């Protein structure tokens, strides 16, 4: 409970009082729920029957396996703690920036590639040239790509899945209780996120002005009606004049013969 914010301590105390458990027990269970991504927990708390497991949706096991009242109590407590993790209250104090990491550089202060002060992630994985580690208790997501580490603020997301197609920032997606979202949608706490792959914009095709729009209907040259009629027919054959324009001009010239 040492890394809880003042608001987090008050919120946890209210949950503990509501369920009739000590703050210490509620704090230990909060850590277990946070390590399970807000959807499951494994714990060993004597006040709650010793060793137990919880999964959101109904699965609950406690040391006193025939104590249904204790099962309902633990289930309700875990659900309240999970909602607390997803709520608007900032429960945990963010860890300080590693002293030796540099912005976007490889982490030198930890045996792992993520910041040493983060501890162990609730989940981690990778694909292609990218790997990630998720820390729900501090709402942080560490991502390493091309030897560079970037830390993101996950906000209210409880991350449960990861996928990547082409190894670029734009193609890395995660899933949470809110559905699919892109890595680039998360705010950067520190580090240099990979630059998005340039996507050229498609050129919009613009049709050329029609010949009819530029064509002059008047026929220069001789005043002889037959000569002009031949020229009008030639322009119509080449497509310069439409059928309607050709018919009108032909009628005008024939009237002059």
Image: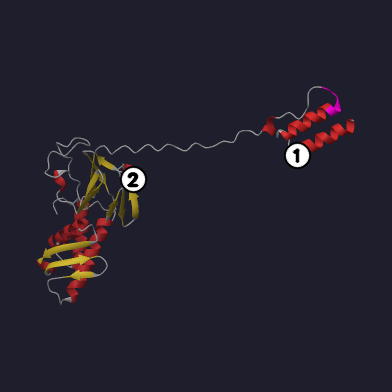
Q: CA distance from mark 1 to mark 2?
A: 54 Å
Residue bounds of the magenta highlight: 222-226
Q: Residue 46 is drawn in which quadrant?
A: bottom left
Q: Quadrant of the N terminus?
A: bottom left
Mark 2 neighbour class, 10 Å CA radius: few under 14, some 14 to 19, many 20 or more = some
Which label sits in the foreground, 1 or 2? 1
The residue positioned farthest toward the bottom in the image shown: 66
Q: Residue 24 is drawn in which quadrant?
A: bottom left
Taking depth in this image into account, of 39 and 254 the one nearest to the observer is 254
Where is mark 1, residue-wise?
243
Q: How many marks?
A: 2
- Residue in the image at 34% along x and 43% along y: 170
Q: Judge from the rendering whether residue 248 lies leftward or rightward of residue 96; answer left or right.
A: right
- Residue in the image at 86% along x and 25% along y: 224
- Residue in the image at 19% along x and 56% along y: 35
Disc 2 is placed on an element classified as helix
Judge whether 195 appears above or below 93 on screen.
above
Q: Quadrant of the C terminus?
A: top right
The location of residue 115, given as percent across then percent down, is 16, 43
The location of residue 57, given as percent across then percent down, is 27, 67
Q: Is residue 223 magenta?
A: yes
Q: Is residue 225 magenta?
A: yes
- Residue in the image at 85% along x and 28% along y: 226
Q: Residue 231 is drawn in which quadrant?
A: top right
Where is mark 2, residue-wise?
171
| Mark found first going from the N terminus, 1 or 2 | 2
Disc 1 is placed on an element classified as helix
């Amino acid at each position: 409970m040492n890394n809880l914010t003042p608001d987090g301590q008050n919120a946890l105390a209210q949950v503990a009082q509501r369920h009739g458990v000590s703050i210490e027990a509620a704090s230990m269970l909060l850590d277990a729920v946070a390590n399970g991504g807000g959807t499951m927990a494994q714990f060993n708390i004597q006040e709650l029957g010793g060793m137990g497991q919880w999964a959101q949706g109904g699965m609950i096991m406690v040391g006193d396996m025939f104590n249904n009242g204790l099962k309902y109590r633990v289930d309700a407590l875990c659900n309240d703690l999970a909602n607390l993790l997803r709520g608007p209250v900032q429960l945990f104090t963010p860890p300080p920036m590693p002293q030796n990491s540099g912005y976007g550089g490889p982490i030198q202060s930890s045996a792992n590639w993520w910041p040493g002060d983060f501890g162990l992630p609730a989940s981690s994985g990778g694909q292609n040239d990218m790997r990630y580690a998720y820390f729900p208790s501090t709402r942080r997501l560490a991502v390493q790509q091309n030897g560079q580490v970037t830390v993101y603020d996950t906000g209210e997301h409880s991350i449960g899945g990861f996928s990547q197609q082409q190894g670029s920032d734009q193609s890395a997606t995660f899933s949470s209780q809110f559905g699919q979202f892109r890595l680039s949608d998360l705010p950067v706490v520190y580090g240099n996120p990979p630059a998005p792959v340039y996507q050229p914009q498609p050129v919009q095709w613009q049709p050329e002005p029609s010949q009819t729009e530029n064509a002059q209907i008047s026929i220069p040259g001789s005043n002889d009606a037959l000569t002009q009629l031949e020229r009008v027919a030639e322009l119509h054959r080449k497509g310069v004049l439409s059928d309607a324009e050709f018919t009108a001009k032909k009628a005008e010239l024939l009237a002059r013969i």
